[in-house]
Image: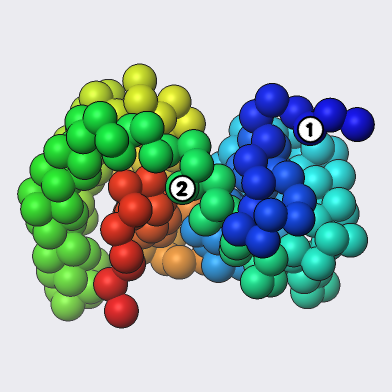
Amino acid sequence: MQAPADAIPTEAGRDLVDAPSFEVLNAIYLHKMATPLHIADVTGLPLDQVSAVLKDQADDAAVLDLEGSFLLLEEGTARVLAFYRDRYAPLRSEGEIISWYEKFENGLNRQFIKAVSDWQTSDGDARAQDKMARLVERMIRHLDAAIPKVPRYDRYAQRFERAMARADRGEMDFVCKPTVDSMHNIWFEFHEDILAVVGRPRDV
């Protein structure tokens, strides 16, 4: 059977991963461990499709099911990184996404890291939270220039807006808590994502 047009060979060259499978595996890669509900929420894929992909990937030794939360195995990580390399190599060659990333890294990202530190050390001071929210609003606007190049980044904007709205309603978990889709957690996942898109190593 012929492989789908959007399939990308893995690093090992044994298998192919299509775009929906990448979305599922990448959600786990960015979150470190994820439930089907979280994956469906952040990818926009139907839950039954997510479950089917997870079953296939588990059967293929790419993910491990730990009582309903899924962890990437070595093969799954190889598939994710191979997709990033092959799909986004043309963007790296153009250079525009590299310039966008550098502006993000040297500007917004540094400011956001400081704002998170200020919020944590102030025990959730309202002014520190407001500063974080303003930076997230700037990030959403900054994403507008990247979305035409990486359309799935529109979902980060939607997630940021939802987290801000819940934090504004007093749900403080949506500021920094790592186990929910908080502003800080979404930012962290995006940072991992853009590093993979531009081919830069993550900080150790």
- Position of the N terminus, as image quadrant, is top right
Which label's residue is closer to the chain start, 2 or 1? 1
Residue 85 is labelled as 2
Residue 9, percent from left and from top: 65, 46
Residue 3 is labelled as 1
Q: Is residue 108 left or right of residue 169?
A: left
Looking at the rendered structure, the kind of residue marked 2 is: Arg
The one nearer the camera, 198 or 136, is 198
Residue 108 appears anywhere in the view = no
Residue 34, percent from left and from top: 64, 61
User: Residue at left 34%, top 53%?
Assistant: 199
In the image as oriented, which residue stretches furthest toward the front?
13
Residue 51, percent from left and from top: 83, 47
Q: Is residue 120 above or below residue 101?
A: below
- C-alpha distance separating marks 2 and 1: 19 Å
Q: Is residue 15 above or below residue 120?
A: above
Looking at the rendered structure, the kind of residue marked 1 is: Ala
User: Residue at left 55%, top 52%?
Assistant: 82
- Position of the C terminus, as image quadrant, is bottom left
Helix or strand or loop: what does disc 2 sit on? Answer: helix
Q: Is residue 68 left or right of residue 96?
A: right
User: Residue at left 48%, top 31%?
Assistant: 152
The one nearer the camera, 204 or 188, is 204
Q: Is residue 18 above or below residue 34?
A: above
Crowding at label 2, few (<14), some or many (≥20) Cα neighbours within 10 Å? some
Q: Is residue 101 left or right of residue 22?
A: left
Residue 2 appears anywhere in the view = yes
User: Residue at left 55%, top 67%?
Assistant: 32
Q: Quadrant of residue 47?
A: top right
The one nearer the camera, 80 or 89, is 89
